[in-house]
Amino acid sequence: MSETRILVIGACGQVGTELVEELAKRFGNESVIASDIRESANFDVEYVKLDVLDREATRKVIVDYKITEVYQLAALLSATAEKNPEFGWKLNMDGLFSILDLAKEGLVKKIFWPSSIAVFGPTTPRDNTPQRTVIEPTTVYGISKFAGERWCEYYFNRWGVDVRSVRYPGLIGFKSLPGGGTTDYAVDIFHQALKDGKYECFLSADTSLPMMYMSDAVKATIDIMQAPAEDIKNRSSYNISAMSFNPAEIAQEIQKHIPSFSISYEPDFRQAIADNWPASINDDDARADWNWAHSYDLKKLVTDMLENLR
Ligand code: AKB
């Protein structure tokens, strides 16, 4: 059996930071290469500077390091992509094609590429959103993720590219800050609660969104990559779910630990994005096909976040 050699692209982001750490634990530091657009970064594994839009540079890293699996995480998230739609589309689509094409050539054996709950739009059922339903995204991020899902399935059907994907909900972790998402409030709130004892939220009190603790998201990512190929019956992207809450509910949970904490609401342009996303997600397919299971609910998440950030 050939040795697993992993490249994580976009390793300095919110998911990448924790994913690299977990992959290194499971496969050994020498089997994992972290890469990002930054000049340098602090990882226990080797780091290479890489712009995924530079196809020749990407090919060279994959060949030089004898990479077998790629986790392609480089992307603009929902709020940032709305500010720069042209670059959001370019990075999110060309970054994916760069890796899909190298896999099509046989240079990479397996790919992970994340999609998002942002694929859903105002015409999608908001509660317990099914795996297969109306999908009419209204943000450039959502459009790019939905198009990416279709292309993943196409590359699998047409050329047998082993690509696997999940639709991440809002992700919450303590090891790094999020960058440019609509669900970022659920991370910022912890930092402000500990620093100032108060938080001004850019979404309204009753905006419920699907959320997940980062350790569960990392587990889902590695689990789907480790599953036998025949168990992956969906080659576009799987719904995955852990919990749903709104800003008022997470604030109440934080107040159980910090009674003086207060929250105020000043919705901005991100409110319109959140209003078009699901409130909760049905992930029966992921649970049935590759045994997806989450561990963290809101209570456990809040306790763990505060303990670690303190
Ligand atoms: C965002 O808010 O843009 C992301 C996502 C839900 O994909 N966290």
Image (cartoon, helix red, strand yellow):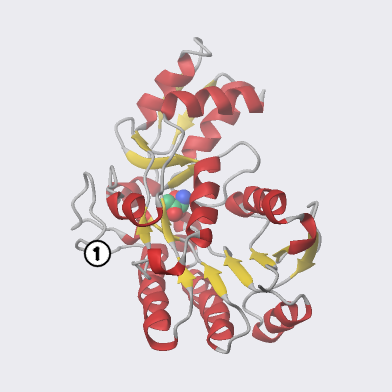
Query: Residue at image x 67%, y 51%?
Result: 26
On the picture, is 204 further left or further right than 125?
right
Residue closer to the observer: 93 or 81: 93
The answer to whether any part of residue 172 appears in the image is no
Task: Identify whether 263 is placed above or below 187.
Answer: above
Query: Residue at image x 72%, y 72%?
Result: 50
Q: Quadrant of the N terminus?
A: bottom right
| Residue 294 rendering spot, x and y as whole percentages | 43, 40
| Residue 19 rendering spot, x and y as whole percentages | 62, 52
| Residue 171 rendering spot, x and y as whole percentages | 49, 44
On the picture, is 66 further left or further right than 303?
right
On the picture, is 193 further left or further right than 236?
right
Q: Amino acid at mark 1?
A: Ile
Q: Quadrant of the C terminus?
A: top right
Query: Residue at image x 68%, y 74%?
Result: 2
Q: How many marks?
A: 1
Give the image quarter of residue 243: top left
On the picture, is 29 further left or further right than 290?
right
- In terms of secondary structure, where does tag 1 sit? loop
Identify residue for label 1.
135
| Residue 132 rendering spot, x and y as whole percentages | 23, 62
Residue closer to the observer: 310 or 274: 310
Task: Identify whether 126 is placed above or below 224.
Answer: above
